[in-house]
Structures are given as structure tokens and as C-alpha cells.
Image (cartoon, rainbow, N blue to C red):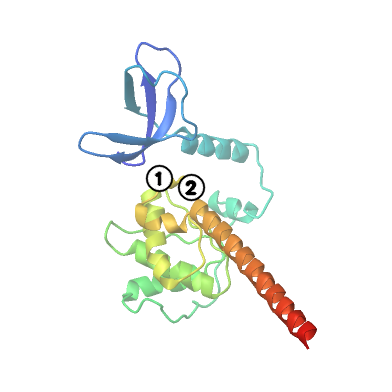
Amino acid sequence: MFRDCCGLFVLESRVYPKQSLYREVGDSSITVAFDDVPEEGLNNPLRLEKLANEVTYRRMKDTLIQLSKGVLKGPASDLVRVLFGERPPTMSKKDVSFTPLNRNLDHSQKDAVSKALSSKDVFLLHGPPGTGKTTTVVEIILQEVKRGSKILACAASNIAVDNIVERLVPHRVKLVRLGHPARMLPQVLDSALDAQACKGERERKARHLDQVNCIKDEEGRVSVEETLIKQR
């Protein structure tokens, strides 16, 4: 239920509900997060209902519409051709050798990382739950970062993205967790775009204050020197 999309209904009203996110569910209370707080109807009896997240389905639909129109331009055009079987995927002639950053990888995980790094188009990593897929994906990301690549890591759920973020943070890689903060686990909020933007603003103000203090110190020293000269 946590971070699911919900609708806030005013009883006996036909107005389309305000959409929000479940933020916290307590023993006797439910906290929800709104993009904009509704101004009317809050004094009336209310009802919360779980809703389907339309954004995901709308994006999938828009993508399928674009593909049906034969839109094959842009950086993903080659990948689209591979995914639709118009040409085979390409790989390096030799598997890429690498030094694992995670020393606990088993042979199959190391082999998967090597093949992923060798792939020039797409690589499918498949396995049942609990077989170490996320661990392998994190190693692939770290190896690509080491090679200077820029990574966009996506997943079918927010919790899956958060799991990746949690495992990347100890490696001190520069990353930004995109998405609504209400959908994120508390332990990854420091990596959220909003948090980093606020941190950057605080650091900018701190640098500005340091510059102001330096100017004041310089002005103070100048005035003291001028006083000494006059006394002489």
C-alpha cells in the first residue's frame, strides 16, 4: 500500500477525485501526499480508494503508438531494430575482461557481467528470484561507470530502483534518484533530485556567506592599516 496511488473522494460528490500517494500508514492514521492540496470539501466526510497509476500505462501506450508509426529516428533507433528482429544484436568478438568490484560474485555472475560489457546493443539477464540479478546489475553499472559511461537505470517498480540505489551509494558514485519523493524509500531520499537541489542551494548560500565574511575581513584589515599610518 505504501507509495501506491490513491484517490481522495468527497462523499456524495460526483467530482473526479484528487489523486495522491500513500505516504505513511499508522495504526490510527493515514498520511497522503498531494502535488497540490485540495481547497474544497476537506470539512466533509472523505473516502480513500486505491487507484491505478495512469502515468505508466499512458507512457507505454504513447511509446507503442510511436513504434507503430515507424518512428526509428534518434539514439535508440538501432536498438528498436534489434528488439523487433530486423537485425541481430552485435557483441565484441571477445568477452570483456574486468576486475570485479564485488569480490563475492560467483562464476555465473562474473560471466553475465562480462557478456553485458561485451554487448553493443542489448543483453538479457534472466533468473528466478533470489539468484543475484540485482547484485549482477549493480556490478554492471559500476563497471560501466568505471569505463566513463553515463547510465540510466530503470525498473518496473520504484522499490526495484531503490534497491539499486541503496547498493550503489556505498560506492560513492554520482547518482540522482528521479521520481516523486513520496514513492521512495526513506533511506534513498538523500539521493533524490529534490534533496540534491536543496543541498546545492544550501552550499551556494554557504559559499556566498564565506565570500561576504572574507570581504568584511579584508575591509577590516585595510581600515586598521589606514589608522596605523595616520598615527605615524
Q: Are marks 1 and 2 in contact (CB under 8 Å)?
A: yes
**Vertical arrangement, residue 142 with respect to residue 73, above or below:** below
Residue 184 vertical position relative to residue 132 in the rendered view, above or below:
above
**Distance from label 1 to label 2 (Cα)?**
7 Å
In depth, the one of 139 and 28 nearer the eye is: 28
Residue at 28 percent across and 63 percent down: it is: 131
Instruction: Please give the label number shown on residue 61.
Output: none
Question: Taking the image as drawn, is residue 212 in sight?
Answer: yes
Q: Amino acid at mark 2?
A: Gly
Left/right of residue 47 with respect to residue 68 in the rendered view: left
Residue farthest to the bottom? 232
Instruction: Identify the image quadrant of residue 169.
Output: bottom left
Q: Position of residue 91 (x, y in %)?
A: 54, 69
x and y, in percent, of residue 171 in the image = 43, 72
Tell me the residue that label 2 is attached to.
179
Disc marking residue 183: 1
Quadrant position of residue 110: bottom left
Outermost residue to the front: 231
SS label for mark 1? helix
Q: Secondary structure at mark 2?
A: loop
Q: State left or right for residue 100 relative to residue 222.
A: left
Q: Nearer the viewer, residue 184 or 52?
A: 184
Q: Is residue 231 left or right of residue 59?
A: right
In the depicted view, which residue is nearer to us: 139 or 166? 166
Which quarter of the picture shows residue 126?
Answer: bottom left
- Residue type at the position of mark 1: Arg
> Is any atom of residue 125 visible in this view?
no
**Residue 232 spot, x, y in % from top left:** 78, 88
Q: Which image quadrant: the N terminus?
A: top left
Does residue 76 sit above or below 149 in this rendering?
A: above
| Label 2 crowd bin: few (<14), some (14–19), many (20+), radius 10 Å | few
Percent x, y of residue 98? 46, 80
